Amino acid sequence: MHIILSLFFSLLFGGLCAYIAAKRQRRALLWLFLGFLGGVFTLLVVLLLPTPKESLLDDPLSNWINKKGGKIVNPSPSNELVKEWSSREWYYVDDKRRALGPISISKLQELFEDDSISKETLVWYEGLDNWKKIETIEGLF
């Protein structure tokens, strides 16, 4: 009887931890396992942990620049960089090695989202010394 009660409460705490973790944008499966093993202590931990900041996910510019396959690579660029990039006319090299542009940062975003360009794509705007891969421009990746 003791084993059945222990198993029941372990599953209960594991489920509660997973539910709370999912609501707080954390890994539910991990917290299910931890809650099963740690019981009430793990429940207290998951309740006391702060909810992750969503500012990185709310910035549309950082979403398309920093996210590929659901993984955020770097934090958001500064507001100054965003303003600078928005005011620039961008040029890029396509698959046929043709320089195309000028285009806006939002059009560059569309091309990236459509997989027409990648992190390896060469870009340039007035002020850059040479063509650079998107991933090498500080703050973009």
Image (spheres, rainbow, N blue to C red):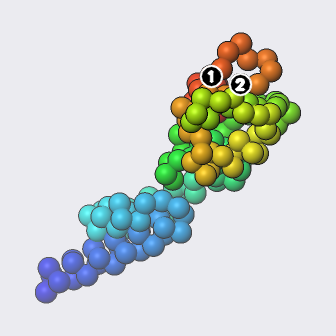
Looking at this view, is 55 or 74 the one in front? 74
> Circle 2: is it few (<14), some (14-19), or many (20+) Cα within 10 Å?
many
The three-letter amino acid code for the residue at tag 2 is Trp
Report x, y in % for residue 74: 57, 37
Which residue bears the numbered disc 2? 124
Q: Identify the residue at horizontal 57%, vertical 53% (top origin).
A: 52
Report x, y in % for residue 7: 21, 78
Quadrant in which residue 45 is drawn = bottom left
Q: Is residue 136 left or right of residue 82?
A: left
Report x, y in % for residue 12: 34, 78
Q: Identify the residue at horizontal 54%, vertical 63% (top origin).
A: 24
Q: CA distance from mark 1 to mark 2?
A: 6 Å
Q: Earlier in the sequence, mark 1 or mark 2?
A: 2
The N terminus, quarter of image: bottom left
Q: Identify the residue at horizontal 34%, vertical 71% (top origin).
A: 14
Which residue bears the numbered disc 1? 132
